Image (spheres, grey):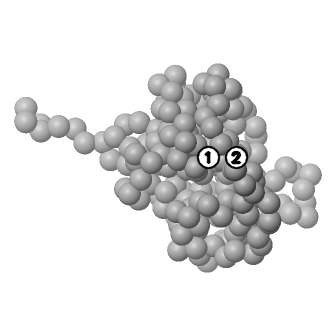
Amino acid sequence: MSENSRNINQPVIESIDEFEQSDLDDLCDAADQAITDGNGFGWLTPPRRGVQEAFWKGVLVVPVRELYCARFEGRIVGSGQLVKPFSNNEASGHIAQVATFFIAPYARGHGLAIGLLAVIEQSAVAQNFKILEVDVRETQTAAISLLENNGYDRWAVKPNYAWNGVKFVDGYYYKKDLGAVEPS
């Protein structure tokens, strides 16, 4: 490599099963930005750092959750979880869910959300899930567009799904039949 060239870190989607402190800091920073932008996963304002760190560390110890993170230019900039049913849920054991799905505003436009969703879908397919579900607030237009453009069907609308600090907003429920997803 010449002196004038530089190492370019490509976007990466990876499974996370433990945190380096720098990665946890990146994830909390990215989540803070997404929450402030209105794309938080339940939070309306970023929680104290200790609360958020405990949340993310807790995700890693729940056996039915798989955490995937999007990394751009070496830093974690977003996440998504594959949430599997508990083993005692035989009736709905074929359905998994997507949770905490976001890309920080400063990292959007690089295909990370599509890649993150594809990796979660591939994991679900590999584990023989038949349906993948996700719910979003009606105000999350980018997420809605992503889901609808990637084969997710809206199957329900829940009035008063969330309070945004000013008014109630509806929730949209989506599902995707994973039979059409090719295993990798």
The three-letter code of the residue at mark 1 reads Gly
Question: Does residue 101 appear left or right of residue 132 in this picture?
Answer: left
Per the image, label 1 sits on a secondary structure element best described as loop
Q: Is residue 169 above or below residue 131?
A: above
Q: Nearer the viewer, mark 2 or mark 1?
A: 2
The three-letter code of the residue at mark 2 reads Gly
The residue that appears at 37% across and 56% down in the rendered structure is: 110
Q: Is residue 116 above or below residue 145?
A: above
Q: Is residue 26 above or below residue 130?
A: above
Q: Is residue 64 above or below residue 6?
A: below
Residue 10: give x, y in percent of width and height.
32, 47
Check disc 2: other Cα within 10 Å, few if <14, some if 14-19, many if 20+. Answer: few
Q: Quadrant of residue 159?
A: bottom right
Asked whether disc 2 touches disc 1, contact meaning CB atoms under 8 Å apart, the reply is: no
In the displayed image of the protein, which residue is found farthest to the front? 166
Would you name the residue on which mark 2 appears? 165
The residue that appears at 62% across and 46% down in the rendered structure is: 40
Per the image, label 2 sits on a secondary structure element best described as loop
Viewer-nearest residue: 147 or 34: 34
The residue that appears at 80% across and 60% down in the rendered structure is: 160
Would you name the residue on which mark 1 appears? 40
Viewer-nearest residue: 146 or 40: 40
